[in-house]
Image (cartoon, rainbow, N blue to C red):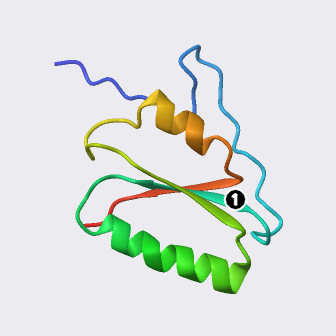
């Protein structure tokens, strides 16, 4: 059996990807919240949204929900979230 190890820092073309620069502040930022469709995620994100809005001054949220936790987000959802300054993608079990 051959074990193949993939490096998540590489693009499909083999070029190393670079991290986006950190935001100086979340004040007036747009934050994307990608829900993975697990049972507790939406409720958890309600709390995250409240904290980020009240304590960090986030201006707007783009919330989207995948149809299934085992699948990648469809291109349409990725495109909608691309307008965000920051993105949170998590699980809610």
Q: Is residue 28 above or below residue 84?
A: below
Q: Position of residue 5 (x, y in %)?
A: 37, 29
Residue at image x 27%, y 69%? 40
- Dividing the picture into quadrants, the one containing residue 24 is bottom right
Hey, which residue is sitting farthest right in the picture?
Answer: 24
Q: Quadrant of the N terminus?
A: top left
Q: Quadrant of residue 44?
A: bottom left
Report whether 84 appears left or right of 72: right
Where does the C terminus fall, quadrant-wise? bottom left
Is 19 displayed left or right of 74 in the figure? Answer: right
Residue 55 seen from this side: yes
User: What is the residue that sits farthest to the bottom in this orientation?
Assistant: 55
Residue drawn at x 41%, y 37% is 73
What element does badge 1 sit on?
A: strand
Q: Quadrant of residue 30?
A: bottom right
Q: Is residue 8 visible?
A: no
**Whether residue 54 is situated above or below residue 80 in the rendered picture:** below
Please name the residue that numbered disc 1 is placed on. 30
User: Where residue 3 sits in the image (x, y, percent)?
Assistant: 27, 24
Q: Position of residue 92 (x, y in %)?
A: 31, 66
Q: 5 above or below 50?
A: above
The count of marks equals 1
Residue most extreme to the top? 13
Mark 1 crowdedness (10 Å alpha carbons): few <14, some 14-19, many ≥20 = some
Residue ID at (79%, 68%):
28
């Amino acid at each position: 059996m051959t074990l193949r190890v993939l490096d998540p820092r590489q693009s499909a073309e083999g070029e190393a990807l670079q991290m986006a620069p950190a935001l100086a502040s979340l004040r007036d930022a747009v934050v994307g919240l990608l829900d993975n469709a697990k049972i507790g995620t939406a409720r958890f994100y309600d709390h995250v949204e409240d904290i980020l809005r009240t304590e960090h001054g986030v201006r707007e949220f783009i919330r989207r929900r995948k149809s299934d936790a085992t699948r990648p987000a469809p291109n349409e959802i990725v495109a909608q979230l691309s307008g965000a300054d920051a993105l949170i993608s998590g699980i809610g079990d």
